Image (cartoon, rainbow, N blue to C red):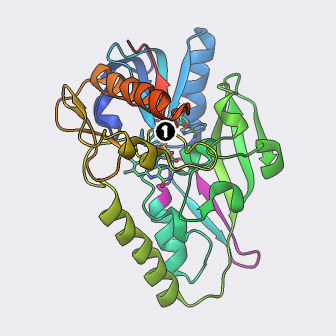
Amino acid sequence: MSDLVRTAVSLAPLTTLKVGGTAQFYAAPRHEAELAEAVQWAHQRDCPLTILGAGSNVLIGDRGLEGLVICTRHLRGIHWHESQGQVTAAAGEPVARLALLAAERGWAGLEWAIGIPGTVGGMIAMNAGAQGGCAADCVVSVTVGDRSGHSATLTATELNFSYRSSILQNQSTLFVTQATLQLHPGGNPQAIVADTQAKLKHRHTTQPYHQPSCGSVFRNPEGHAAGRLIEQCGLKGFQIGQAQVSPLHANFIVNLGGATASDVWRVLCHVQSEVGNRWAIALHPEVKTLGVLP
Ligand SMILES: Cc1cc2nc3c(=O)[nH]c(=O)nc-3n(C[C@H](O)[C@H](O)[C@H](O)COP(=O)(O)OP(=O)(O)OC[C@H]3O[C@@H](n4cnc5c(N)ncnc54)[C@H](O)[C@@H]3O)c2cc1C
């Protein structure tokens, strides 16, 4: 067993929902050489590979995950390209930190990302977005690796971004190692920081931001807000075990403490079924389910 790879590591604390079983094997590389070592370890054993960022958009089954889980959150590093107005950030950089650092330099373009509790890699894979902005608006290129140790640079066009989606979600063999974003330097730092903080404040008042959750559970169906459809079914506060449809924002399922993945999944399925029956609209999960769910 390599020093880098551990066995039977509990994944719940590594997710914002705080549910899920253990990883059969787990590695948290601190730099690219360790990442390459972990990927090679899985490749040599023909072992399934799961990439986890900050775990803020995943629902991991209670029976955990087979194979190797690589957590990228310790892959850090930011390089500002002053003359081009671009920034290159490692996959594990917290998006919110990057947004605040950019604002403090007077670089606009990431204000929308302030409250997103994910990593740069997760932001790209999910095409995360909020309050009128999304990753696709600013990605120039992304360096990806694959399980056989190859790496390549993909342009934004090649990532085929669409609403909360990119090719990385269907290409489970590719993972982001770093991304270059185009921002807009030369602004007034105080004004950009103030705008960024106003957006964060808006989140704090409209979302159950300090309770364990995975953010919005469902994608917004064309022409509708998922939260509104759920609320109009009277589902705010609906609870199974310790998983509850947030009374504050109906598109959030919160863990009241000690919820299981099974509790969360049952609430999710109930919401889907009620909205389907009432509105004849299919809600599709935005959250990524990993492992076995009931
Ligand atoms: C309170 C709260 C608020 C949120 N608000 C928003 C919001 O406003 N807008 C929004 O879009 N999302 C929001 N989210 C969801 C989540 O933060 C984003 O989807 C985020 O981009 C996920 O990043 P992550 O690092 O946590 O990814 P994870 O949850 O760890 O992973 C999500 C998916 O991305 C893949 N992935 C992660 N890292 C990589 C990588 N390096 N390479 C390839 N694939 C990778 C994983 O395999 C998985 O399929 C919110 C979540 C919470 C808890």
Please tell me how many numbered marks the rendered image carries: 1
Q: Position of residue 97 (x, y in %)?
A: 45, 64
Residue 41, given in percent of the width and then of the height, sits at 56, 18
In which quadrant of the rendered image does the C terminus lie? top left
For residue 91, above or below residue 25: below
The stretch drawn in magenta includes residue 214: no
User: From this viewpoint, is residue 180 visible?
Assistant: yes
Q: Position of residue 141 (x, y in %)?
A: 76, 53
Observer-nearest of 92 and 260: 260
**The quarter of the displayed image where residue 89 is located:** bottom right
Examine the image and state in which quarter residue 198 appears: bottom left
Horizontal and vertical percent position of residue 149: 70, 27
Residue 170 vertical placement versus 57 (above, below)? above
Q: Which residue is mark 1?
A: 218
Q: Which residues are magenta?
A: 82-95
Q: Residue at x 65, y 25 (%)?
A: 172
Disc 1 residue crowd, few under 14, some 14–19, many 20+, Cα 10 Å: many
Q: Is mark 1 within 8 Å of ligand 1?
A: no
Left or right: residue 17 versus residue 187 is left
